[in-house]
Image (spheres, helix red, strand yellow):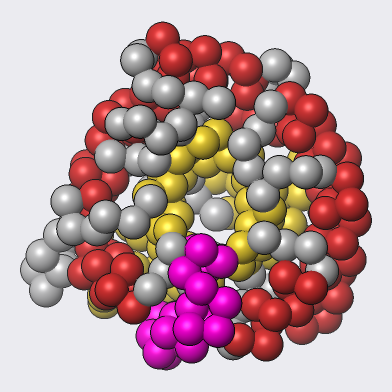
């Protein structure tokens, strides 16, 4: 692996505030998104991801304003997701300072939107946000089911097959988030990462479960090109990004 591993703090934004829970529930306030973004930029984050966790129409304007303010403060790539449903939504996010857009529910509902967005803006601007959970449903061969609406609704779709289809349709990256591991601080779902990596060649961002710097290298070994986390950065020591990068470096992987 010659490309540097990216370390990405995730800001789950609800009504203009950063929130964090466990398994997407029990959300608690984690601070002002612009202030956190500024802090992470100075601390050495390689990118930032904003996810509007409610994405209701009443909150969308708040999100655009947060994106605008953040883009003025930080100079690292900014990915924004939540409520992205069409080419027009991506266009507006890019005009407000986002570098990439993340799509989840709308792509599950109508996969063709991936083609439409990437044909207009290029694959590099679109990230598939794939929220998956373990299932015993015999119809889902991989054992991992795609969920939507912030992990609240199952789809009956195989997460590995969906990742493969989305990559073939042109998404530039896949943000693979384990609903089961989210916020638990018990480590990434390595089996899920390996299963998806086996089927796709696009960059894979591992998300869900990081609780300490030692959790990150195994995710990279499993096939992640980037590692994303929230709680460990929001509520941990201010030098946590540096600690994580040091751990990755000591494990033998290139890091910025």
The one of 64 and 215 positioned closer to us in this rendering: 64
Q: Is residue 201 left or right of residue 55?
A: left
Q: Is residue 184 visible?
A: no
Which residue occupies the foreground of this view, 215 or 24?
A: 215
For residue 189, what is the image quadrant? top left
Residue 243 % position (x, y): 58, 14
Q: Is residue 71 above or below residue 226?
A: below
Residues rendered magenta in the picture: 107-128
Q: Quadrant of the C terminus?
A: top right
Residue at image x 31%, y 26%?
218
Residue under the point 49% across and 50% down: 23
Magenta highlight: main SS:
helix
From the top left corner, tell me how far across and down residue 12 is, in percent. 67, 53
The vertical placement of 100 against 92, above or below, is above
- Residue 221, image x and y in percent? 27, 29
Is any atom of residue 255 visible in this view? yes
Does 103 sit left or right of 194 as displayed? right
Viewport quadrant of the N terminus: top left
As for residue 30 lying within the magenta part, the answer is: no
């Amino acid at each position: 692996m010659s490309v540097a591993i990216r370390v990405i703090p995730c800001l789950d934004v609800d009504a203009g505030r950063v929130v964090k829970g466990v398994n997407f529930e029990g959300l608690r306030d984690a601070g002002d998104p612009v202030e956190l973004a500024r802090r992470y930029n100075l601390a050495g984050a390689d990118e930032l991801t904003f996810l509007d966790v409610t994405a209701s129409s009443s909150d969308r304007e708040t999100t655009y304003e947060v994106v605008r303010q953040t883009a003025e403060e930080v100079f690292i790539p900014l990915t924004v997701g939540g409520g992205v449903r069409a080419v027009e939504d991506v266009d507006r996010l890019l005009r407000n300072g986002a570098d990439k857009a993340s799509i989840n529910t709308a792509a599950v509902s109508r996969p063709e939107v991936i083609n439409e967005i990437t044909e207009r803006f290029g694959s590099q601007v679109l990230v598939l946000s794939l929220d998956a959970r373990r299932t015993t449903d015999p119809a889902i061969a991989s054992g991992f089911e795609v969920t939507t609406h912030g992990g609240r609704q199952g789809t009956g779709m195989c997460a590995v097959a969906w990742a493969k289809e989305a990559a073939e349709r042109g998404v530039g990256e896949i943000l693979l988030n384990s609903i089961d591991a989210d916020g638990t601080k018990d480590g990434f779902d390595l089996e899920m990462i390996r299963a998806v990596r086996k089927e796709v060649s696009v960059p894979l961002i591992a998300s869900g479960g990081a609780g300490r710097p030692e959790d990150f290298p195994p995710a990279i070994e499993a096939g992640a090109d980037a590692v994303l986390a929230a709680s460990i950065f929001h509520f941990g020591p201010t030098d946590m990004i540096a600690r994580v990068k040091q751990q990755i470096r000591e494990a033998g992987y290139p890091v910025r």
